[in-house]
Amino acid sequence: MKRFSGRFIATMEPITTMLKEEEDSKAEILSLPAPNLTVTASELPEAFAEINENVRRRISQQNEEVRTRLDKQDETLRAQAEASSRIELLLTSLVARLPPPNGA
């Protein structure tokens, strides 16, 4: 039982150390002074312009990501359509080679 306990403690030690460090980091962050988030009336146009630019940049980035995904989907659909066409041609060719039904 002692060997198991020693191994268990040795295994848990890095985890408990990490949790302690995380706790210390949280305490350090909480002890920092609160940032001054006030904006004066003269700073509003600049603040709005910055926010607007960030929003435009993010929307542009998202649009580019969507375009990329749609392009990939288009490529996939084209490849699937080509494969379907080839399969149809093969099936048509195979059906043409079948002997006529017994009744004909």
Image (spheres, rainbow, N blue to C red):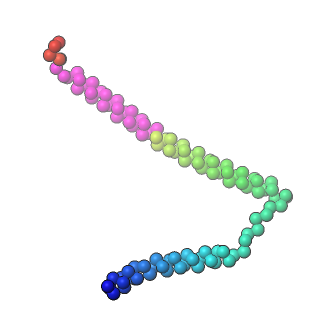
Asked which quadrant contains residue 66, the reply is top right
Magenta region, residue range = 74-99
Q: Main secondary structure of the magenta part?
A: helix
Q: Residue most toward the front?
A: 1
The C terminus lies in which quarter of the figure?
top left
Give the x, y percent position of residue 56: 67, 49
Q: Residue most toward the bottom?
A: 2
In this view, 46 is above or below 66: below
Give the x, y percent position of residue 31: 68, 77
Between residue 4 and residue 29, name the one nearer to us.
4
Residue 44 appears left or right of 30: right
The N terminus lies in which quarter of the figure?
bottom left
In this view, 74 is above or below 59: above
Residue 27 appears left or right of 67: right
Residue drawn at x 33%, y 87% as measured from the top left: 2
Asked which quadrant contains residue 12, the reply is bottom left
Residue drawn at x 73%, y 69% as measured from the top left: 35
Residue drawn at x 46%, y 40% as measured from the top left: 73
Residue 39 appears left or right of 81: right
In this view, 17 is above or below 65: below
